[in-house]
Amino acid sequence: MDTNIPLAEKLRPNTLDEYVGQEQLVGAGSVLRNAISSGQLPSLILWGPPGTGKTTLANIISVAMGRPFYNLSAINSGVKDVREVIDKAKNQGMFNTKGKPILFIDEIHRFSKSQQDSLLGAVEKGIITLIGATTENPSFEVISALLSRCQVYILKSLDREHLEQLLEKGRLELQGSTGKKINIKESEAMLRISGGDARKLLNNLELLVNSSTTKTIAITNDMTMEVLQNSLALYDKNGENHYDIISAFIKSIRGSDPNAAVYWLARMIAGGEEPKFISRRLLILASEDVGAANPTALVIANNCFQAVNVIGYPEAELILSQTAIYLANSPKSNATYLAIKAAKKLVAETGDLPVPFHLRNAPTKLMKQIGYGKDYSYAHDFENNFIHQDYLPDEIKNQILYTPQANPREEADRKRLRELWKKKYGY
């Protein structure tokens, strides 16, 4: 076997039985496995983090179904490339008895609207079966007309058991190809750094083995961190440290450090990260981490999101920088984030509690007769547009879900809530 082939490529499985992880999709009796075995495969989108097996699964599907297979990368392909492949698929599909050709598009979220539009007709007419792979939420990145014609399958980061299986396969492969005796004494650092990314895990294992000049290698956590610390500083816009850098960026803003925020922003810009991805994360942060402490932050972040989609690079970097610094300098609160989490937990624990009768809508005479809307007080009819009444089900009527935090904006909210509700909620 060619020693220049990366370990992750050498170990790429060829059948579903060799495939590690994603049992919810390809395990015995699963929907996708049944679709493959029956030959009734719909167009689909594989959505999941890097290294979870999206490309591998697409290849396995094509082999298992015996169909012609075309592969395009959204990074390097344009509308012309798509149309050429569709024309080839149309001609080949006429003479193929096993079903229509499969067109796999890696990183389909990087396709523009016009590029995605060029796929639509071929999918609608059944010329191809489309398999798209994406690390981004397809609801945001795939046009609705195309998304409505595809099934979305979610791939999860691999868990420890799966990663350990891959490590052992990698160890045996490297032991055979290098002639070295390899002992993985400690794997925690490798597993942590991989973040559930199989490709990253195997690449790092190979790097560790190749960095050693001895015939016997004992891999420990200390050795892993020492060898890999330089590679961890790199930014790979195609996925390797994509999530590491955005994580550092978000945590810097959350930690109110504008200097670190613009540094990590510059790292992403230099690495070619899409401004839409960065601005969407800023939009989420404005609600999750700034929230009620500065409600204007959400307006600023939304304007940023809209602007960078219109302008693009290089000018968009100014808007991203302004927004990142504004959010880093804003007071922070995750009270609304905690409130919705607490509310969802309460719903899960208490179930579908009945709506109190006085809060129910009464559009018919019968509903009014049985008490719907009875004794409801219209707040605007009272002083300060407020009247003390219960709005939660009786079983949880004094439950506190939102707790204002210690910042000027929410302290004012707390004061007002205390004045309105007196002792009801303990504000």
Image (cartoon, helix red, strand yellow):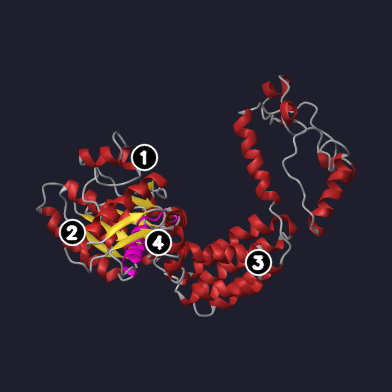
Whole-angstrom CA distance, mark 2 to mark 3, is: 46 Å
Q: At x 37% / y 66%, what residue is drawn?
A: 114
Q: Disc number at residue 300?
A: 3
Q: Residues within 10 Å of mark 1 (few under 14, many from 20)?
A: some
Q: Position of residue 408 (x, y in %)?
A: 82, 59
Closer to the camera in the image, 99 or 268: 268
Whole-angstrom CA distance, mark 1 to mark 2, is: 31 Å
Tell me if residue 146 can be seen: yes
Q: At x 54% / y 71%, what residue is drawn?
A: 308
Q: Disc number at residue 109?
A: 4
Q: Residues within 10 Å of mark 3 (few under 14, many from 20)?
A: some
Closer to the camera in the image, 49 or 115: 49
Residue tagged 1: 24
Give the quadrant of residue 104. Answer: bottom left
| Quadrant into which the C terminus falls | top right
**What amino acid type is highlighted by mark number 4?**
His
Q: Residues within 10 Å of mark 2 (few under 14, many from 20)?
A: many
Closer to the camera in the image, 155 or 389: 155
In front: mark 2 or mark 4?
4
Please, what secondary structure does the residue beneath circle 1 have?
A: helix
Instruction: Tell whether label 3 touches label 2 (CB within 8 Å).
Output: no
**Lower sequence index among marks 3 and 1:** 1
